[in-house]
Image (spheres, grey):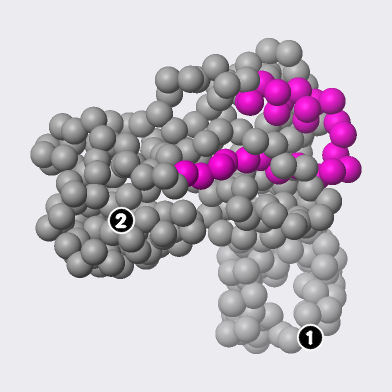
Amino acid sequence: MTTKQIDYCIELARTLNFSRAADNLFVSQPTFSYQIRLLEEEVGFSLFDRSGKGVSLTPAGSQFVTFLSGMREDLKRAIEQGQNFSAKYRDSISISLMVRQAVYFLPEAMRLFAESHPDVQITPKFQYENGMDGFLKDETDILFSLKEHTRQIPGIVVHDLFTSHIYLITQRDDPLAEKDRITEADLQGRTLMVGGGSPAALRAVQHRLISTGRIGYFNSPDHDTTLTNVAAGRGICLAPGFLNDHSGQFAWIPFDCRESFSCVLCTNKDDSRPSLRAFLAVLKKLYRDAVAFPL
């Protein structure tokens, strides 16, 4: 299947007229009809019904053209991005993270890095799930992860980035928001939202609190749902500091516990590009210098 055949098929589906579709694409009708026939032979089913009254899509053809249209748009974007890249950049570094706020200083690191490496593109890729799988398949160059998830994985280099602590999230007008630090006793009688793929350290804290019998709880499937429930006054929650977007919508108060999260960046052991090392150095320096920044 060629891109020309894809374009012919989409145009015929739009016009339902061989002559008009051929004219719109500036080809002769015999050439156009031949390419459509080749495409149908390749896919193994009829895309169009021909009759004396004109042309109509078969049910299979209708479904197929919907898929082709989406694929053609993706291809168009890929070509445009490739054109932009080839015109300005000589190299690209992609970084996978589950949510934008996980690497808070990423935008600043990208800006600083561009000053010394204007011909290297940094591309964030947000993969809430399966980020590790994509990284191991060489779909991304850098992976943000928790250190506990990187143990015994061959062929990678783990770079320590920062330690993140546990915070209580409440509405800003909640009485708990006035405290500088939250203890277990402060949560008695409150409803704690749990679940949503919480890391092991956070699950341990949640279990310890719930097991006292003095704190209610209900399950929330993911972090965004949890924040929506907090905003609706349905409860409070604990979360790693690296999920804080620092927008000011909620109060994030440090929770008094020993658990924390070791946040790291992973790279492929075989990737020795100087530009990759330089970008990692910029990002790590930003975190080293942010001594008083809540994480």
Q: Residue at x 74, y 86 (%)?
A: 45
Query: Relative to 223, does residue 250 appear above or below in the rendering?
Result: above
In this picture, is 145 found above or below 52?
above
* Residue toward you, 40 or 64: 64
Tell me which amino acid carries mark 1: Gly
Badge 2 crowding class, 10 Å Cα cut-off, few under 14, some 14 to 19, many 20 or more, is many
Tag 1's secondary structure? loop
- Magenta part of the protein: which range? 260-284
Is residue 289 found left or right of 190 in the rendered image? right
Residue 65, above or below 169: below
Along the viewing direction, whichever of 22 and 104 lies nearer the viewer: 104
Q: Nearer the viewer, residue 150 or 1?
A: 150
Q: In the image, what residue occupies the spot 59% across and 77% down?
A: 63
Identify residue for label 1.
44
Q: Is residue 190 left or right of residue 95?
A: left
Residue 82 magenta-highlighted: no
List x then y, in percent, for residue 164: 47, 38
**For discs 1 and 2, the disc positioned in front in the rendered view:** 2
Residue annotated with mark 2: 226
Which quarter shows the C terminus?
top left
